Amino acid sequence: MLGGGTAGLVAATIAGRLGARVVLAERAHTGGDCLWTGCVPSKSLLAAAALAHRMRTADAVGLTPCEPAVDFAAVMAHVHGARERIAPHDSPERLRAAGVEVHESVGRFLDPGVVEVGGRPLRYRAALIATGSRPMLPPIPGLGEARPLTSETVWDLTELPTRLVVLGGGSIGCELAQAFGRLGSDVTVLEAGPRLVGREEPEASELVRERLEREGVRVVLDARVVGARTRSVDVEHAGGREAVDHDRLLVAAGRAPDTDGLGLARAGVETDAAGAVVVDGRLRTSAHDVYAAGDVTGALPFTHVAAYHARVAVVNALLRTRRRVSYRAVPWVTFTDPEVARVGLSEAQARERLGDAVVVARHDYAESDRAITAGEAYGFAKLVGDRRGRLLGATVAAPGGGEAIAALAARIEAGDTIADVSNAVHAYPTFAEGPAQAADGHLLERLARARPLSAAALAALRTVDRLPRPRRRMPRPTGGTL
């Protein structure tokens, strides 16, 4: 195993349980980006920022708002403490106790069937490349001299930046921009594209932009950064050219597969133009005995995908099975407020594939009883289906969206329909009702079209849709399933 992040750890554990002799090489810290620079520290920071924001906006639930006294050093101590509490689970000691031979060093291929680990050659029956990815720095004049932060180095900060400029409005950029803004930084986000979190539904992008700007974050879209200095960046945008001042500059402009120095060519392992290891549907590389998993493949760059890859790759490698990966029902979440959770096809992707044979169901959380009671009545749930109503994709851009998306992913995996989402009984009142209420509304509209109703009857149906969901099951329309 080359790499001790999520993919390497999961694969090593499974391989050990299958009775294989396992050698794992990790040049930094076992646990990978998720533990040290990604999921764990970022969600710890977001938790502190969210509480600070709730204190400022306590009037949303009838309390007197107050400005929190943010001790940034204490916040970062919380971040580091979360990492330290979780680290033993991913430690070399735990792996060694499970029978894995761990080398805290670089691993590289010497020849087909041979790797160098800890300064000595080892022959292998099967190898797994799981070296992850690293932040990219765009080719901007002066950027190196500007001492930019990245998602790896931002956790070394000991003082809150007064003015923070974030280059990049993807998931990482938006999460950190909102967090630092809520903790007291004056934040500007410079995004090269026409919208934030550009792979999400356009209305989700707009919702995130509105929320950031409402909280005081400046968002500049279609921004071209043409130069960087220690205390400012030069930006061209629709309004002209300007110098944006900063105390610290954070680059969140994407990640690149980490394949340098692995000797891949010596093993016959091909990479693409971006440096990602080329794999087939079974995660096998161009070398028949070498597999790859996680970010290094250039696939969806998420911890849960790395773990999924590991489970598929290690079984294929050791047991010679032919399991294949599928991303049809893989969810992901941008942990802004509101969270933007997505699984499957967007509406645009579905229409590109199916044309007009697409149905869309939507529910606005402004009408969600749970969201109203929590003082967080914003966001939406959107379901995308085919003509028969089979669920193809979903977005929940709302409080608790990351929790609600799991059930929808399971629905897609099972081949369920929008009607099945409606027919499930949900606890009331919960944020997770949002997708079901979207399905309810869609079915009511379909019923009304199938059976012309009077205005009074239609109003009565809409009243039913406002009742707590556990008290009723929505009927299926006659004349086929939806």
Image: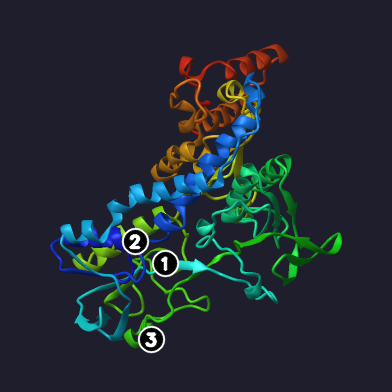
Q: How many marks are shown on the rendered structure?
A: 3
**Tag 2 near tag 1, CB within 8 Å:** yes
Determine crowd level at label 1: few under 14, some 14-19, many 20+ residues with C-alpha closer than 10 A.
Answer: many
The answer to whether 423 is drawn above or below residue 124 in the figure is above
Residue position marked by numbered label 3 in the rendering: 265
Q: Amino acid at mark 2?
A: Ala
Secondary structure of the residue carrying tag 3 is helix
Q: Give the x, y percent position of residue 403.
A: 46, 37
- The label on residue 181 is none
The answer to whether 400 is drawn above or below residue 297 in the figure is above
Q: Amino acid at mark 1?
A: Gly
* Colouring chosen for the image of the structure: rainbow
- Relative placement, left or right, of 100 versus 158 is left
- Relative placement, left or right, of 178 versus 269 is right
Determine crowd level at label 2: few under 14, some 14-19, many 20+ residues with C-alpha closer than 10 A.
Answer: many
Secondary structure of the residue carrying tag 2 is helix
Mark 2 or 1 closer to N-term? 2
The answer to whether 57 is drawn above or below residue 313 in the figure is above
Q: Nearer the viewer, residue 41 or 5?
A: 41
- The label on residue 7 is 2
Q: Give the x, y percent position of residue 414.
A: 39, 42
Mark 3 or 2 closer to N-term? 2
Q: Amino acid at mark 3?
A: Ala
Residue shown at the point (68%, 52%) measured from the top left = 162
| Residue 367 shows in the view | yes
Residue position marked by numbered label 1 in the rendering: 132
Q: Give the x, y percent position of residue 425.
A: 43, 24
Quadrant including the N terminus: bottom left
Distance CA(mark 1)–CA(mark 3): 18 Å
